Amino acid sequence: MAVDVVVVNYHTDELLYDFIESYEKSWFEGCTLTVVDVEGGRDMVDTTIPASLWITTSQNIGYARACNLGAEKGKNDVILLANADTLLEPDAFSQCYGALEHFAEWGILGPRQVDDNNRITAGGIFGTETNIGQRGWQEYDHGQYSDIRDDAKSVSGSLYFIKRSVWQELTDCPYMQQYSPGIKGAFIETPHYYEETACSYHARAHGYKIVFYGPARMVHLWHRASPHGGRADQQVETSKAMMRDFCRQHGIICE
């Protein structure tokens, strides 16, 4: 089949337009693009995306809930959840899809990512269950992280590929429904951050591997979608506490 791409925008319409342009160069037959425009308005970006795939919220509902809303729209076998300050690359996009589909035990995959100065913004997240970290953060990229690792603890939430069957399994998990009754997505709805970390830990608890796919390189400008030190950053500890609480209820050891 193909990929349902969900991009979340929060007052960064120029970046969103660039993302849409990169999608239009990267998509293949069957792919869809859903825009979740938080506190936005469709008229702010010139696009031909159908109104049914353009979700506008009047309030700041947070990245996780926005992703959950967007993921409901598609039916393809892979979902890509994306920040507006990222750019897809045609070959890398199709490579990520093909690789994730090829291995039954692979549930989630993330590409290598760099900023506009060619500095690493995603080199894979590794470590122990209780101590994880970004590999190669802000190193100059000369291909040193072009490896394929299926032992990642998580991958960056800025470009987060997940099989729809896994997304649905995690959504329907009794522990998820106990934690957030009626939730319609696999991201616990934190104020900001740690939603993808919790999802990765959750997927591993269900027996799936989390894959850093270094041969595929895409762009994440980092903190262009939200200001450094702004409201989102101020929610880090609250979001981390929510992740820990969810994992504890599920019997998952986490940081």
Image: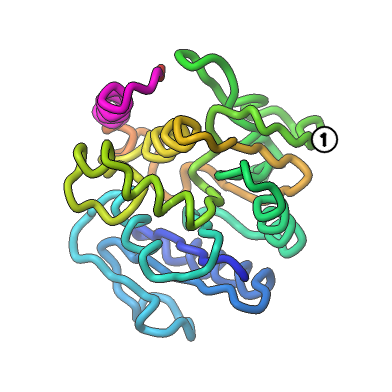
How is this picture coloured? rainbow
Give the quarter of the image for residue 120.
top right
Magenta-highlighted stretch: main secondary structure?
Answer: helix
| Residue for point 58% across, 47% down | 220
Q: In which quarter of the image is the N terminus?
A: bottom right
Q: Is residue 39 left or right of residue 207?
A: left
| Residue for point 40% across, 19% down | 254
Task: List x then y, in percent, for residue 136.
Answer: 67, 25
Give the quarter of the image for residue 184.
bottom left
Q: Is residue 161 left or right of residue 172?
A: right
Q: In this view, does 108 lie to the left or right of 255?
A: right
| Residue for point 35% across, 45% down | 187
Up the image or down, 215 lies above or below 15; here it is above
Residue extent of the magenta highlight: 236-253
Q: Is residue 241 magenta?
A: yes
| Residue for point 56% across, 54% down | 86
How crowded pointer 1 is (Cα within 10 Å; few <14, some 14-19, many 20+) is rated as few
Up the image or down, 95 lies above or below 251; here it is below
Circle 1 sits on which residue? 142
Q: Is residue 63 magenta?
A: no
Viewer-nearest residue: 182 or 233: 182
Q: In which quarter of the image is the C terminus?
A: top left
Q: What residue type is labelled 1?
A: His
Up the image or down, 1 lies above or below 233; here it is below
Task: List x then y, in percent, for residue 177.
Answer: 23, 44
Q: Is mark 1 on a helix, strand or loop?
A: loop
Task: List x then y, in percent, for residue 98.
Answer: 71, 57
Up the image or down, 83 lies above or below 236; here it is below
Task: List x then y, in percent, for residue 124.
Answer: 63, 32
Count of numbered circles on the image: 1
